[in-house]
Amino acid sequence: MKRKTLVNSLPVESSWSGEFDLHCDVCVVGAGTAGAIAAIAAAKRGHSVIVCDSAPIAGGSATAACVWDYYYGSDGGLYCEVNAEADSVSDIYLKSMSGQPGSKRSYTTAQKSLALAKFFDKYNIKAFYSSYVTDVFVDSNKVCGVAINDGERTSTISAKVVIDGAEGAVCRLLGLNTLGGRLSDGRSARFSRTVGVMSGGYLLGRWRFCGDFAGADTEKAARLDYEYAAEPPCSVERLDERCRLYSLGYETGRREVPCIETEQVYLFSDYLDGKHPDGAIFYTTSPLDNANPDLWNEDEDFQDWQLLSDMHAYGVSVGVTPKMLIPKGVDRLLVAGKHIGTGHTMTSAVRMKSDMEKCGEAAGVIASLTIEYETTTFDIADTHIDELRGILGASGCYNPENDRGICDLNDPTGNTWKSCHLPVTAEELRESLSSIHPSLGLISVRLGLPEQANELLRGFLDEGGLLRENAAIGLGLLRDESCIPVLHEILDGGVKTYLYESPVKYQYPWLHATELCNYIKAVCLIGRFGHADDRPRLEKIAAYSGDDSHLTKAAEYARAALKSYDRQA
């Protein structure tokens, strides 16, 4: 047996033949949003479970960081039982930002953590808090246990299955491959913190973005954590008798972590190319909740969605398969959390609280079946999909109705959001692209849904107005260079903007309005085509240093394009 650890951030292994201090069926490292539910799911099936977490309570950033307003995500699953217990702990109502009837419930730190603690007690789950994983034990390609440290002593734990719910901590000790950050600069999403505000008899969540950990060593990352946790709350809040501040369980939350290379990797580029994984065992629903302000540095798949198609007010359902929870080539190890095999862009569409809780439940059930069948995690993923769906369907975790496709985040339907019809015929596409809100038409083109889309769009170029401009953007999405003359016309005509306001308003106010600015889109696309004779045009745009926000943003896209020119040279 081998013992693997990190020395100076590099994986090191040594032989080990010692005795384990503790034994269990399932060891869950990280009792956070996903990990806590994973532990309960495995224990409910009669397996002995040990969890460890660096925090002093269970629940992770979904509780300790007061992440209260993450109301996107698909409903259903074991977490509903935990929430019902939380309902019995306290009757404090956390009001959603929308104030709409039927808004989803959320809970304070104490409520959710106490509910989780009750479930841990009910199912005899042994928990080690304020502890972190230091070593992993492996036999060939099979994980056999971990070592944890609580600051005073190290304990070794043997386990039939280990679940990494600690943002890849176990995987890092094994030296496993990750899928990385943005292709342009390797950076990841910002981190943020939240506070609670009592106002008008309601407790509301508020958050602020703090920065990012990209390139930070352990000491710098820890310092950033402490600095932002200690700062005063957002300036819009005040401390007086009318508005009291509640800062329960202060913690900064990483909005994205490196994704592990799993047996099946499903990227957002796969989604845009019309590929959908077979064998989903639960579905997520979310916007692409990537909070980075510098979209010009993002991967093209995210730019296609967020900038070129203006889809920020729409969400997408993602089917998650068992193989997306199994690190590539490693048996008896599962991942549960933001670090599953979805990649930088897609992870922002699967990380909502209820979806991460479903992810944990799925991992707990996969671990259980692996033990019950005395087989490998690979075998469960390959041959037990129907059984997994049956078990997860009984709790509501697996529900085919949660596969919403693309949905309107301003238009709720029951406990979810209205699925959108995407334009596919020539007339539907003409109507969409002639409007100031061509989002669904453009994303339909990018998804390859209209037949002979290139030919249709080239025909629209012969017409005028927004239909001509939006058709050129659509052709740009298809990498069709026939759009370039119209893109030049858009740039020569200067900045023009159009504001669309949704007739339905729900939840977050910044989703209600969508601004169309084809000038910025044209800069992005001209930069992508990379023609040498367009370089002077881009250099002129990049040189802008005034106060106009649209020209400033266009300049950023031009600068990003020029960097690409330089790399190619």
Image (cartoon, grey):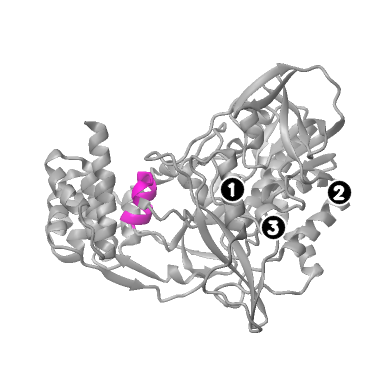
Q: What residue is shown with label 3?
A: 64
Of callouts 3 and 2, which one flags the residue occurring earlier in the amino acid sequence? 3
Examine the structure image and report whether residue 304 is included in the region drawn in magenta. yes
Helix, strand or loop status at disc 1? helix
Looking at the image, do the residues carrying marks 1 and 3 touch, with CB atoms under 8 Å apart?
no
Q: Amino acid at mark 1?
A: Arg
Residue that carries the numbered disc 2 in the rendered image = 123
Determine the residue positioned at 70% across, 74% down: 93
User: In the image, what residue type sits under mark 2?
Assistant: Tyr
Estimate the spatial distance between the alpha carbons at disc 1 and disc 2, rounded to whole Å: 38 Å
Find residue 23 and report its image quarter: top right
Q: Of helix, strand and loop, which one carries label 2?
A: loop
How far, Cα to Cα, is label 3 from label 2? Answer: 23 Å
Residue segment shown in magenta: 296-309
Image quarter in which the C terminus is found:
top left
Examine the structure image and report whether residue 422 is included in the region drawn in magenta. Answer: no
Q: Is residue 21 above or below residue 234?
A: above
Residue 144, horizontal then vertical, whole percent: 76, 26
Q: List the residue tagged with mark 1.
A: 223
